[in-house]
Image (cartoon, helix red, strand yellow):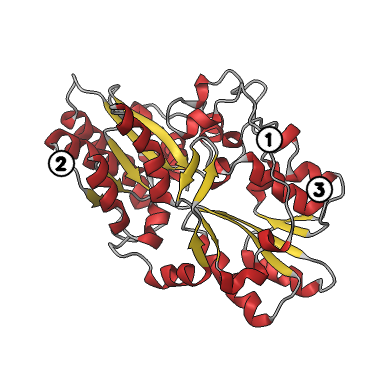
């Protein structure tokens, strides 16, 4: 399979692992964070930690859009479905994320709320068109990657003159989230990271340039990576080489998809439909300034937050759940006493166990499938295709 097997070649992986081992200084600790949940799953699916020297530590960041959404926004979506009797359209991962009192959209659906899972925002428009006597709300979440499709349906709904359609906007932005992790450490004089693996899909939209200020402000190398195992091994090697050389710059490993300026057409669509919120709460990171988007005034008639009066929830995460610390990179999923016991993908207590991009779900799914370095071969990689 062209352009897939090439990036899962066991011999090439072994060569990269050997290069990493030669570059690493035994007396030094290398703490590297992959921001994106998709990277986390690749790392564990292909047993990458077993290919790295013991002093190269991969930490997991908040790059899972389902995981970082605070409980009060889940509660608001449940309220839209149950109190306001709308048809609430959501991506599948959101259905099982627990809100206050362990209520979720899935449980609300079981109690009679009209909640529909979809794969594309365009499906929500079609539902609104087919059900003119019902109010339809699209529960929009995600980083910059999923924001352009939401912009498209806002434009289309406006052009179609749909009166029964609106969007509950929860789109967040990557660079402010990275600041939310690094700024507290800088203020306290700590060094928590030596390098960061930049998200590939997000960078396809925003480009490499927005990371330049982060490198300048925090003196931290960033390497934008693709999502295959060879991509990540190469990106880790590039970060280690920068750390050893004392270099601090943005490098783009994912050159086959990411450019410096990104997708300018997508950026223009986002700019037309959205503006930056002054502040937004993130699970694990708290209130972050200028870190999320809201719908512009020109599309206010399609904004569910303006259309419906929503209660401000004060729900809090389970105190025993370590999801907030996992999202900050402060703890690993296995540090949580609930992991794998009372908290499983079938019975999630925290959001990191729900999403296909959550760190806890990655640990749980692949903990028995970590591939030892000696068996990291062409066959063991190719069977995943």
The disc, 2 or 3, on the residue closer to the chain's N-terminal end is 3
User: What is the C-alpha distance between the residues marked 3 and 1?
Assistant: 20 Å
Q: Are marks 2 and 1 in contact (CB under 8 Å)?
A: no
Which is in the foreground here, disc 2 or disc 1? 1
Which is in the foreground here, disc 3 or disc 1? 1
Q: Say which of 91 and 8 sits in front.
A: 91
The disc, 2 or 1, on the residue closer to the chain's N-terminal end is 2
The disc, 3 or 1, on the residue closer to the chain's N-terminal end is 3
Q: Residue 339: give x, y in percent of width and height.
A: 59, 23
Q: Quadrant of the N terminus?
A: bottom left
Place residue 328 in its image quadrant: top left
Q: Residue 351: give x, y in percent of width and height.
A: 60, 37
The residue tagged 2 is 247
At horizontal 78% and vertical 60% (from top left) the residue drawn is 87
Q: Are marks 2 and 3 in contact (CB under 8 Å)?
A: no
Label 2 CA crowd tier, 10 Å (few <14, some 14–19, many 20+) = some
Looking at the image, is 107 positioned above or below residue 298? Answer: above
The residue tagged 1 is 315
Would residue 186 appear left or right of 273 to someone viewing this image?
left
Q: Residue 297: give x, y in percent of width and height.
A: 57, 70
Q: Residue 149: give x, y in percent of width and height.
A: 55, 66
At horizontal 61% and vertical 77% (from top left) the residue drawn is 156
Residue 79 visible in this rendered orientation of the protein = yes
User: What is the C-alpha distance between the residues marked 2 and 3?
Assistant: 52 Å
Looking at the image, is 150 positioned above or below residue 281? Answer: below
Label 1 CA crowd tier, 10 Å (few <14, some 14–19, many 20+) = some
The image's mark for residue 109 is: 3
The image's mark for residue 46 is: none
At horizontal 66% and vertical 42% (from top left) the residue drawn is 72
Q: Secondary structure at mark 1?
A: loop
Q: Secondary structure at mark 3?
A: helix
């Amino acid at each position: 399979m062209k352009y897939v097997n090439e990036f899962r070649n066991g011999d090439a992986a072994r060569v990269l692992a050997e290069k990493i081992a030669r570059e690493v200084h035994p007396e030094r600790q290398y703490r590297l964070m992959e921001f994106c949940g998709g990277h986390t799953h690749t790392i564990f699916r292909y047993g990458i930690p077993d290919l790295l020297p013991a002093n190269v530590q991969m930490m997991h960041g908040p790059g899972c859009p389902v995981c970082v959404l605070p409980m009060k926004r889940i509660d608001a979506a449940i309220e839209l479905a149950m109190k306001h009797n709308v048809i609430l359209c959501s991506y599948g991962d959101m259905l099982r994320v627990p809100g206050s009192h362990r209520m979720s959209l899935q449980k609300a659906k079981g109690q009679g709320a009209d909640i529909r899972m979809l794969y594309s925002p365009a499906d929500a428009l079609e539902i609104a068109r087919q059900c003119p006597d019902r109010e339809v709300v699209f529960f929009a979440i995600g980083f910059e990657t999923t924001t352009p499709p939401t912009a498209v349906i806002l434009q289309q709904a406006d052009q179609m003159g749909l009166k029964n359609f609106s969007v509950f906007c929860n789109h967040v932005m990557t660079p402010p989230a990275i600041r939310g992790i690094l700024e507290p450490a800088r203020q306290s004089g700590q060094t928590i990271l030596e390098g960061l693996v930049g998200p590939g899909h997000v960078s396809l939209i925003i480009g490499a340039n927005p990371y330049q200020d982060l490198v300048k402000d925090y003196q931290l190398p960033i390497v934008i990576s693709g999502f295959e195992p060879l991509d990540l091994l190469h990106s880790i090697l590039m970060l280690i080489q920068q750390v050893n050389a004392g270099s601090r710059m943005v490098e783009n490993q994912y050159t086959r998809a990411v450019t410096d300026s990104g997708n300018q057409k997508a950026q223009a669509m986002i700019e037309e439909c959205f503006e930056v919120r002054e502040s937004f709460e993130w699970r694990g990171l708290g209130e972050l300034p200028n870190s999320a988007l809201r719908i512009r005034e020109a599309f206010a008639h399609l904004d569910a937050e303006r259309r419906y009066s929503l209660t401000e929830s004060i729900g809090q995460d389970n105190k025993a759940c370590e999801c907030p610390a996992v999202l900050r990179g402060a703890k690993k999923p296995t540090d949580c006493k609930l992991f794998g016991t009372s908290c499983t993908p079938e019975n999630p207590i925290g959001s990191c166990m729900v999403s296909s991009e959550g760190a806890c779900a990655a640990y749980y799914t692949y903990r028995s499938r970590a591939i030892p370095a000696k068996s990291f071969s062409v066959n063991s990689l190719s069977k995943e295709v």
